[in-house]
Image: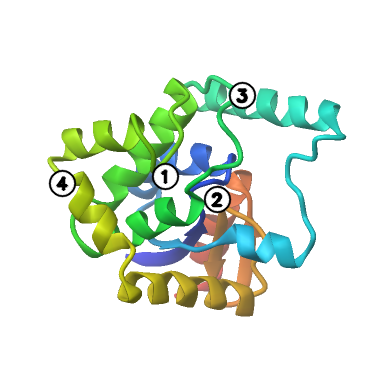
Amino acid sequence: MKNIDFYFSIGSTYTFLSVTRILDVEKKHQVKFNWKPFSVRAIMKEMNNIPFPKDKINKVNYMWRDIERRAEGYGFFAKTPVPYPLSEFDLANQLAILGLEKDWGIDYIRLTYKKWFQEGKEPAIDPGISEICNELNLNKDEIISQAKTKDIEEKYHSNTNFARDKKIFGSPSFIIDNEIFWGDDRMEDAIKWLKKNVS
C-alpha cells in the first residue's frame, strides 16, 4: 500500500475537515496516511503569519463559513465559530503523539476535532478531554503526565523540525518525498500524484 505523510496540528481549523474524512479517503483510494503531529504555530510565528487576524473580520467570517460549507459538502457538519486559538495547543498535539504510539491516537484526534467543531469544546481541556478519556477508557491524569515527558516533547520537536526542513508552512500538509500538498482540498491531489509518480 502506498504511503503519504500527513503533517497536521490540532489547533489548525481546516484540519478538522481532513481528520474527519481521511479514513474514508484512505479506504477508497487504497493508500496509507502516516499521521505526523507538529507545531504549525511555531512555524507560523517564524513567518509572522496570523491565520485569523482580528483586524480582518471579513476574512475571518469567510473562513468560518467556508469550513461549514466544505463540511456540509463532505456529508458532515461544523458549527462555527469555535474556541480559537487553543490555550493548550502543545499539549493537544503531544497527546496525539503519545496516542499514535499506542492504539488510541487516531480515535483521540478525531474525537478531539469532533468535540471542538461540533460541540464547541476546546481541545486538551475539560470538559472535552475528560469526555474523550471516558469514551476511550483512558486515565486522563496518566496520559497528560505521559504526554509531558521529555521523550514525547522531543518527538514533537523532531516532527516540527522535519516539517520545517521540508518547507511545510501550514496544516494540513500531505508530503510525498519532497512534494508538498497544502490544505484539505489538496488531499486528493496528493493521492493522484502518488499513484502517477511513485511505483
Q: Please say if the residues under marks 4 and 3 sit with CB atoms less than 8 Å apart.
A: no
Label disc, if present, on residue 22 of the rendered structure: 1
Whole-angstrom CA distance, mark 4 to mark 1, is 27 Å
Q: Residue 24: x percent and y percent?
A: 36, 40
| On screen, residue 54 above or below 159 | above
Mark earlier in primary sequence (4, 1): 1
4 vs 1, front mark: 4
Residue placed most toward the observer, 33 or 112: 112
- Taking the spot 51% from the left edge, 54% from the top edge, the residue there is 9
Distance between mark 4 and mark 3 Cα atoms: 30 Å
Camera-near label (1 vs 3) is: 3
Report which residue position mark 2 lands on. Answer: 187
Left or right: residue 149 compared with residue 118: left
Sequence-wise, which precedes: disc 2 or disc 3?
Answer: 3
| Residue occupying image coordinates x 50% and y 51% | 89
Label located before the other in sequence (2 or 4):
4
Q: List x then y, in percent, for residue 109.
A: 36, 45
Q: Does label 4 or label 3 sit earlier along the sequence?
A: 3
Tags 4 and 1 touching, CB below 8 Å = no
- Residue type at mark 3: give it: Pro
Q: Quadrant of residue 112?
A: top left
| Residue placed under numbered mark 3 in the picture | 81
SS at badge 3: loop
| Mark 2 vs mark 4, CA separation in Å | 34 Å
Crowding at dot 3, Cα within 10 Å, few <14 / some 14-19 / many 20+, comes out as some
Q: Secondary structure at mark 4?
A: loop
**Res. 139 mark:** 4
Q: CA distance from mark 2 to mark 3?
A: 24 Å
Amino acid carrying label 2: it is Met
